[in-house]
């Protein structure tokens, strides 16, 4: 089974992809991880991507599709893959369709994780983590048990991602609705789309996705 997870930043795509990977023995394919792996392996397309990134440029859709092309041919993808963070645009979706068709493969499901924008801004802007062990927390939903002390390792230093603030999150949401949200209609028209309530508890979202996948 080959699937795509759709949803705005902070919707929980990464978390759910990891759970699907574990429960269904599928492979999570993140474009960032695939790019880094291709560069590290020194593949021809990895060398192209490395040169562009070192010059400060953006890696083209053609190169990303090329990396996906190489990656899904690897043995661990034969049981299915989960695309998280790709495609982001309609041209990328069309290119992915062409690639899979040439390989005799197809997408089985596209899962849209629906969230409330206001709650999403709160969810992301309240995130922080332990600077020592990386344990994740939230100002409102998951504070440390003892104020200022990590539950996991007892450290007292914490950090926040520079882009985890309300203004940046709203900007990222705007980019999502402008560039990626049209994919919802695209895959609905192809009868591939299933939507789940991303505002539910993680276990419930997992259950909804499992039911959607069958």
Image (spheres, rainbow, N blue to C red):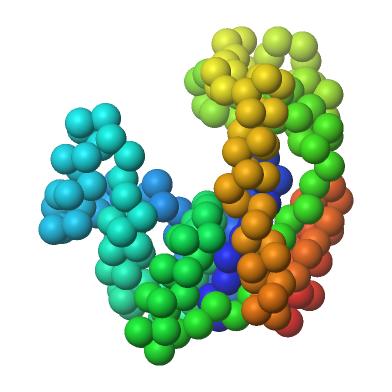
Where residue 174 appears, as percent x and y from the top left, is: 66, 36
Task: Please indicate whether residue 105 sits to the left or right of residue 137 in the image.
Answer: left
Question: What's the residue at 62%, 23% (across, down)?
Answer: 168
Task: Please indicate whether residue 204 sits to the left or right of residue 73 in the image.
Answer: right
Image: 117 above or below 101: above
Q: How many numbered markers are drawn?
A: 0
- Could you say which quadrant of the image residue 207 lies in? bottom right
Quadrant for the N terminus in the image:
bottom right
Question: What's the residue at 38%, 49% (across, down)?
Answer: 33
Image: 32 above or below 117: below
Quadrant for the C terminus in the image:
bottom right
Residue 121 visible in rendering:
yes
Where residue 176 appears, as percent x and y from the top left, is: 63, 43
Where residue 201 appears, as percent x and y from the top left, is: 84, 49
Where residue 20 appears, as percent x and y from the top left, is: 62, 65
Image: 146 above or below 25: above
Question: What's the residue at 70%, 80% (across, down)?
Answer: 191
- Could you say which quadrant of the image residue 192 lies in? bottom right
Image: 207 above or below 89: below
Residues 156 and 110: in front is 110
């Amino acid at each position: 089974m080959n699937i795509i997870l759709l949803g705005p930043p902070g919707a929980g795509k990464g978390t759910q992809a990891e759970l699907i990977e574990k429960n269904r023995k599928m492979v999570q394919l993140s474009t960032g991880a695939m790019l880094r792996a291709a560069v590290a392996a020194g593949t021809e397309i990895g060398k192209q991507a490395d040169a562009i990134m070192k010059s400060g440029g953006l890696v083209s859709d053609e190169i990303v599709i090329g990396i996906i092309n190489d990656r899904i041919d690897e043995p661990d993808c034969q049981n299915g893959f989960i695309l998280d963070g790709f495609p982001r645009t309609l041209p990328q979706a069309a290119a992915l369709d062409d690639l899979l068709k040439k390989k005799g493969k197809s997408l089985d499901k596209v899962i849209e994780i629906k969230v409330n924008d206001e709650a999403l801004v709160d969810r992301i802007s309240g995130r922080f983590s332990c600077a020592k062990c990386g344990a994740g927390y939230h100002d409102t939903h998951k504070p440390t048990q003892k104020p200022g002390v990590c539950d996991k390792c007892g450290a007292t230093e914490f950090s926040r991602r520079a882009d985890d603030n309300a203004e940046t999150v709203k900007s990222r949401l705007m980019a999502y609705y402008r560039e990626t949200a049209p994919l919802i209609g695209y895959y609905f028209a192809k009868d591939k789309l299933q939507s789940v309530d991303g505002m539910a508890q993680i276990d419930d979202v997992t259950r909804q996705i499992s039911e959607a996948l069958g």
